Amino acid sequence: MMDMKKTKVGIVGASGYSGEELVRLLLTHPHAELAAVTSRQYAGQTLAQVFPKFGNHPHAKNLRFADPNAAMLAKQAQVVFLALPHGVAAQFAVPLLQQGCQVIDLSADFRLKSAAVYKDFYAHDHPAPDLLATAVYGLPEIYRSAIKNATLIASPGCYPTSILLPILPLLRAGLVKSAGIIADSLSGVSGAGRKAELDYLFVECNESVRPYSVPRHRHLSEIEQELSLAAGTPVVIQFTPHLIPVNRGILTTLYLVPEKHFDNADEAAALSQKITACYQSAYGNEPFVRLLDGKALPDTKNVVGTNVIEIAWRLDPRTGRLIVMSAEDNIVKGASGQAVQSMNILCGFPETAGLI
Amino acid sequence: MMDMKKTKVGIVGASGYSGEELVRLLLTHPHAELAAVTSRQYAGQTLAQVFPKFGNHPHAKNLRFADPNAAMLAKQAQVVFLALPHGVAAQFAVPLLQQGCQVIDLSADFRLKSAAVYKDFYAHDHPAPDLLATAVYGLPEIYRSAIKNATLIASPGCYPTSILLPILPLLRAGLVKSAGIIADSLSGVSGAGRKAELDYLFVECNESVRPYSVPRHRHLSEIEQELSLAAGTPVVIQFTPHLIPVNRGILTTLYLVPEKHFDNADEAAALSQKITACYQSAYGNEPFVRLLDGKALPDTKNVVGTNVIEIAWRLDPRTGRLIVMSAEDNIVKGASGQAVQSMNILCGFPETAGLI
Amino acid sequence: MMDMKKTKVGIVGASGYSGEELVRLLLTHPHAELAAVTSRQYAGQTLAQVFPKFGNHPHAKNLRFADPNAAMLAKQAQVVFLALPHGVAAQFAVPLLQQGCQVIDLSADFRLKSAAVYKDFYAHDHPAPDLLATAVYGLPEIYRSAIKNATLIASPGCYPTSILLPILPLLRAGLVKSAGIIADSLSGVSGAGRKAELDYLFVECNESVRPYSVPRHRHLSEIEQELSLAAGTPVVIQFTPHLIPVNRGILTTLYLVPEKHFDNADEAAALSQKITACYQSAYGNEPFVRLLDGKALPDTKNVVGTNVIEIAWRLDPRTGRLIVMSAEDNIVKGASGQAVQSMNILCGFPETAGLI
Amino acid sequence: MMDMKKTKVGIVGASGYSGEELVRLLLTHPHAELAAVTSRQYAGQTLAQVFPKFGNHPHAKNLRFADPNAAMLAKQAQVVFLALPHGVAAQFAVPLLQQGCQVIDLSADFRLKSAAVYKDFYAHDHPAPDLLATAVYGLPEIYRSAIKNATLIASPGCYPTSILLPILPLLRAGLVKSAGIIADSLSGVSGAGRKAELDYLFVECNESVRPYSVPRHRHLSEIEQELSLAAGTPVVIQFTPHLIPVNRGILTTLYLVPEKHFDNADEAAALSQKITACYQSAYGNEPFVRLLDGKALPDTKNVVGTNVIEIAWRLDPRTGRLIVMSAEDNIVKGASGQAVQSMNILCGFPETAGLI
């Protein structure tokens, strides 16, 4: 691996929080070379000028933001990341794919199998419905082999990752009911993007905690799609996102009902063993899933800056429920790190290359 | 009211966060005079020395912390607030009551009707089980008339207040099922008290979000007691507290199931009307409950520093659930403000005196 | 005082942070009635709609924002507060004064005596230079008697207040040199106003500390004007503002050189005594200045939400300097609280009415 | 370099913030192997148990904290880092050196040349005065060649680094006066260490800004020692540290007086050119110093998590001063990163190995 020629990659929309994090990860990636970054707002400026924090990387002083142009990008890069708003991403994906690029899209544009569901949740027609069948949902722990052969990867959002990774193995193993699932999530403010809106000013977010988009957040569409696929039956869940005053991190608490009642200590012990085995089998060898044991519970501060998701669970004999909790960095495992993880798989690099 | 002689009050354990907030509220209370404050740690020092922020109040320069002594206190004050750890509070309540004081206890010692439940959740025998029958649970919106005639008020904790006020009217009106209730709560760090423990250091809490005490937090005992009384049947709930990096505030999200299904828009509208009417009837005239309408959702920053609890709700036709959200200041409505509200009722002062 | 008819007051530009704080202070003021609030952006909405936190105040449900109109305002209010950007404030001050209102302006428009200095620092011609001579600089501890008879009060900004109150008595008493003064200030983010700009997003400010406007911040103009008046000679100072991740508060550290050297313990003790006496004489009876003694140093958390400024000082025998430190709430003593304090003086109310 | 055997390193006192950061840096260092970690408190537990965040590193599951024992350590490691309180560090340095280890001490024990100055500032006799002459002050940009041949490196503290790196080149070049220097510093709370003290609780630090140790902080001793060496004359400075609510980061603002007056634009331009050349010559090729140009000013958020110090400066023609500002991560460039940088030099690794 050490001598291989580096793969050239580009980022469209590199000035938002996900884009910036892609820059960070790709500037120091051992097998990829960041060859192009685009931003309408910052066209002509170097990476170092826009992001002083990268200023010590020699490449950051030379690489300049360009106006986004698919034809140009296709010449500069083999793999292109799209860090754009939904609706806009598809406009770049189409020509880039036509010109032979591999596309890793961080928007919601290609995450859904159904253009109708897309329209229902995003309130406009899908801009490129023909591509939905080819796109691979970029959750490496679940779709690794499909990602390996993809040309278009729809990298999942932060909330879906924090909800799907803890639930999917349990649903697939038939350990929990597919009905009645509740996901209560707490997100850092970077999840709202780098947008100049009053709601996300420091003074409005600091010393504030608030729910939003209750009861129907857009990401429900992809979450329920993936849960339904795993359960083999349509799944509808309750999902409540909250905004909390941290820069980064999502903490999700999941309320699940085991398929099998556990009315006494023996049944609880048996069920515990099954859950442990299920997670161990699903994630025991995954480099970016940390299954907590003992008394440890997830804490966003233990995953911030890394591509790791922490998972812990507790059975509650009083209520008969299984509580599963996860913590991830919404911008890394919940966005750019996961996209780089997919790139690693796609390009045949070690899956952990450039990631911690 | 303006000429009435001020009632003398005392605070035992005035150096924690609840005690400090009681000091703040009582120093400027129009009908109460803060006559005694105790603290083993700070005995001999003035209020102004221990809490520089109160230094501009003339009384703060004269009033000195004393070692706690029930006999002395009973001579100095008619109403005594106990801001002590559970177990310790009862030791002061007994002699103070014997000497004719009215006691408002902010600990958990007198909140439960059953000494057995107390032992189950607090892991030691109840220190004064005989008093449990006399104590009044100090939730003014629910027990106002009993508070008026109480001698011992057990002022509820922050989590219970944030959970009970939103649910009790619905349960009493039979609008929601008593089974399957989930309370997901997010608390500011002051809820952990002013304790020198590594877990609550700035660096450990800032940029951190984490659940704790899963699945069996002590406050479940009083929450379930009060829900059971309202429902007329034993209620067991799921409760998950989380620690979030704000000084103050609790945001609780409640997942409830309406008694009556709502399968179409008409049924949803009918149910909505009933819920609106239920809350309006329960809290429409309450000075410290803010029922949000329109698109507004609770936000802790809108209640911090006040005795107000904000409540909003949404029906979710997709899941058939009712989501109710509340926000309060854990140290004011969740502790000291509520205790002062009870004092106002007990002493015949206007209920809002000294509170905003 | 208790029976006096309330004075009607209005606020122009009530939707920024200073305006919101004026609303908070005036809604509960014992002698003022908030009769009019204006905001182009929110015209037609009630106070309760725009600021849910005031929703429990009955007046907040009735009072609606109106488009700003000087003629209308002059009919509704005797005292009008202007919480507007500089340049805009003057446009309202002129007609309001003509129609007999008393105006308390929180902008920089009338703080300078010289239209030339204004132009130098604010980069446009002064919009109403004729009024500069009539305006009174609204620092009550310094200009109380002039404020009493003013028609136009130019209420000082947050940085000037935090710098002037600690220095002015020392300069007037000739205890410190007027040359070589350095003011290093740390401001909470609310000081930047409620503006939707990327620089003030939560993610850009949280976990960030940064200087700005180095070396020539606009407020230098009024600071140096007032220092020069006190010193009786032109004073030029060094001033470095920093942005720190708190909602509210300014902490200023001042580096001063005593007029008289103190080379040994006796001289230091003599100088200390003089400084103590100087501050005691200037502020010993001031309700909103807290002179710290013993080991206490200013801390913004002890003044937030109040109109108090804390001051402490230390002589450094190693360097021969006097270090003076102050803490205030930039939105209260540094803006709206100070403006209300001036109103109290102007209207003959107790100076502390409605303020803590 | 790729095939060289890794150097075995140990950390004494690995459970504080500096120790934890050393663990982070050394676990992934390409040329060092973390062979031993000690902690009285956590002896017997694995790194993964004490620091869940490192749990995904295979080594963290095997490496256990041991009770500190110099003889044992000397067998396990060639290079030993001491992350201990001052006074305690020397007790380990002596036997480790005797047994042939190279020691990198992060405490203050060996930073001063003079045992008398040590006693004056640290209030106890120096525990190993004989070693003071051998110790090298571990500021790589200044003492690189001495570090290369050192056996005992006294790695500088966070404040000194933030002050010395910006000033030393100017003093050495004779561009600024050595008298009258003022350093005003703002530090994140991790600088106080992982100590369970009330002052550093989240609630006491959040929404708080405060100076401390005014006017004589201990680190003045090493700062003035190094400034004096550079100036060739005794230097006494003013230094005011402040605590601000961020986890990490130090922002220092320095007030300097150029040797040569600049009374007009030409003189200012000439001086600017000299300062630029001075910094360029000193740091133009330094991998961890970022000289900002254009309008950029230091911001701690641009250096957090990295070993970089940002420096910018402004001449103020109004006051005749030179303002220099720096930002660094107090735990990386201000502690553990700098120590690893020294290890890299000492061991002949690339100086940037394992650091960003």
Image (cartoon, coloured by chain):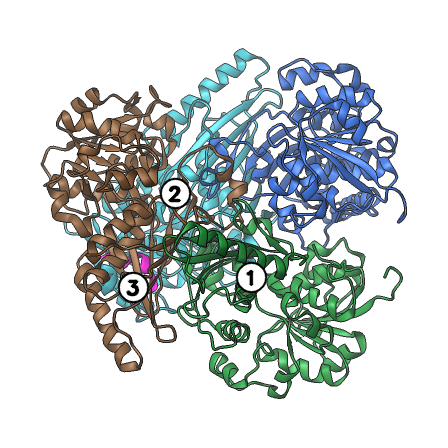
Chain colours: A cyan, B blue, C green, D brown
Name the residue that disc number 3 marks. D292
Q: Is residue C356 above or below residue B187?
A: below
Check disc 1 and report its element: helix, strand or loop. Answer: helix
Where residue D311 sits: x, y (%)? Answer: 30, 60
Residue indicated by mark 2: D191
- Asked whether the residues under the numbered discs 1 and 2 touch, taking CB atoms below 8 Å apart as contact, a structural biologist would say no
Quadrant containing the C terminus of chain C is: bottom right
**Which numbered circle lies on residue B306?**
none
Q: Which residue is mark 1?
A: A198
What is the magenta range? A50-57
Kindly identify the residue that appears in the image at 74 percent across and 85 percent down: C98
Q: Amino acid at mark 2?
A: Gly
> In the figure, residue D346 lies in which quadrant?
top left
Disc 1: CA contacts within 10 A as few (<14), some (14-19) or many (>=20): some
Residue D263 or residue D71, whichever sits in front: D263
In magenta stretch: residue A72: no
Q: Nearer the viewer, residue A120 or B37?
A: B37
Residue A53 part of the magenta segment:
yes
Q: Mark 2 and mark 3: span between their CA atoms?
A: 25 Å
Q: Quadrant of the N terminus of chain C?
A: bottom right
Helix, strand or loop under label 2: helix
Q: Nearer the viewer, mark 2 or mark 3?
A: 2
At x 25% / y 69%, what residue is drawn?
D259
**Looking at the picture, which amino acid does disc 1 mark?**
Leu
Q: Secondary structure at mark 3?
A: loop
Q: Are marks 2 and 3 in contact (CB under 8 Å)?
A: no
B333 shown above or below C224: above
Front position in the image: B188 or A232: B188
Please count the marks in the image: 3
Q: Looking at numbered disc 3 in the image, what kind of residue is underneath it?
A: Leu
Is D1 left, or right, of A114 in this rendering?
left
